[in-house]
Amino acid sequence: MEGENRPFFLEAHRRFTLVGIGLCVTIAFWVGLNTVLSGLLQPFFPQGAPMWVSLLLSSGPLYAVAMPMGMMVIDRVPALQAREFTLGAKRFWTMMIVCFPIMVFGNVIGSWMSGVISGGQASDRVSGIIARSDPWMNALFVVLLAPLFEEWLFRKQLIDRTRRYGERTAIVLSAFAFAMFHMNLYQFFYAFGLGLVFAYAYMRTSRLRYPVIMHMVINAFGSLIGPGALRLASGGDIQGLLEGSTSEAALMRAAESNPSMMAGVMLLGLYGVLMVCLVIAGIVLLFVNVRRLEFYDPPEQLPKWYGARLAFLNPGMVVYTALTAVLALWTMGLLRF
């Protein structure tokens, strides 16, 4: 490190640290308020709170308190205003379709690693909650609110404040912080991969609408379309399908005498075919277009690899990574407090 550049590097380190601290504050308030409110409401729901209450307890403190508190720290890092561009229909749909193989293979990797680490004892509680939730609640909390707030924080706020030090660094930092934010190994890999796509779309356009729409579509497939097909095919016994207590043979026998279930089975089959087609198309488009990705060096571009070191190995991001990792292990039942 040259002496004349030392103040510049120290300032970059300070700013990346503030971003990490802001994320830590967000997680601390979110988890803390959720725990306190859940404890206060437990006497009113001795048999367990309704799913809409659980979703509200999770999302309400996050959006109304935790994110604003975290932004009080992140706002100390100046945002870099960039010119806005349109993405174009062709590029948008190309990036949208590329998301599907990332989602599927990332989910497979996350499920496999969760099973290995937990010895087969862990379960994907988030997917189970979404599958059993009322579709209208999923539409509100998962498809509408989550993409709006999460893209606002992890794409606009983080990228606008770190892009001055390198586009690749800002994109990877945004995707990594987004993936760790889920505090769930099942979701980490596909959230990281999707985060890269969303961040690149925002980086090239500076318009939040593109990653928000992509995020909404992906969440709609995972929380509305897929579970909806399962619910119709199972005649409402989605729990049995999820737990494996209802076999495919039993499902087909029941569907033979139930027209609505048969329609659900056919819809589920069409959904499976659609997903296979989207995954194949996404893989092809990814390989065709990966060499066409564009990155530009900003005036304050940090030296190669040094930017990654400042972005990820500062105290704020180290604590954020450790905090979310510990909470992920706790949610998997591998740690007890």
Image (cartoon, grey):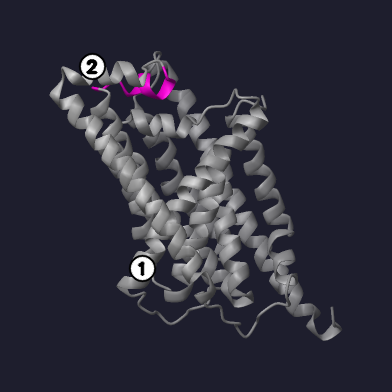
Q: Is residue 110 left or right of residue 258?
A: right
The foreground one among 45 and 320 is: 320
Number of numbered labels in the structure image: 2
Residue pictured at 27% horizontal, 23% vertical: 234
The foreground one among 280 and 94 is: 280
Residue pictured at 34% horizontal, 65% vertical: 93
Look at the magenta stretch and give its main secondary structure.
helix
In the image, is residue 242 part of the stretch drawn in magenta?
A: yes
The relative height of residue 286 versus residue 166 in the rendered view (above or below) is above
Q: Which residue is mark 2?
A: 254
Q: Is residue 308 left or right of residue 100?
A: right
Residue 132 x %, y %: 34, 28
Residue pictured at 64% horizontal, 57% vertical: 20
Q: Mark 1 Cα within 10 Å, few/some/many (few <14, many 20+)?
A: some
Helix, strand, or loop for circle 2? helix
Helix, strand, or loop for circle 1? helix
- The boundaries of the magenta stretch are 235-244
Q: Mark 2 Cα within 10 Å, few/some/many (few <14, many 20+)?
A: some
- Quadrant in which the N terminus appears: bottom right
Q: Quadrant of residue 87?
A: bottom left
Residue 57 x %, y %: 41, 34
- Quadrant in which the C terminus appears: top right
The relative height of residue 98 versus residue 228 in the rendered view (above or below) is below
> Spatial distance from mark 2 to mark 1, Cα to Cα?
42 Å
Q: Is residue 122 visible?
A: yes
Q: Is residue 149 visible?
A: no
The foreground one among 253 and 115 is: 253
In the image, is residue 73 part of the stretch drawn in magenta?
A: no
Residue pictured at 48% horizontal, 52% vertical: 102
Q: Which residue is mark 1?
A: 92
Tag in front: 2 or 1: 2
The relative height of residue 207 versus residue 196 in the rendered view (above or below) is below
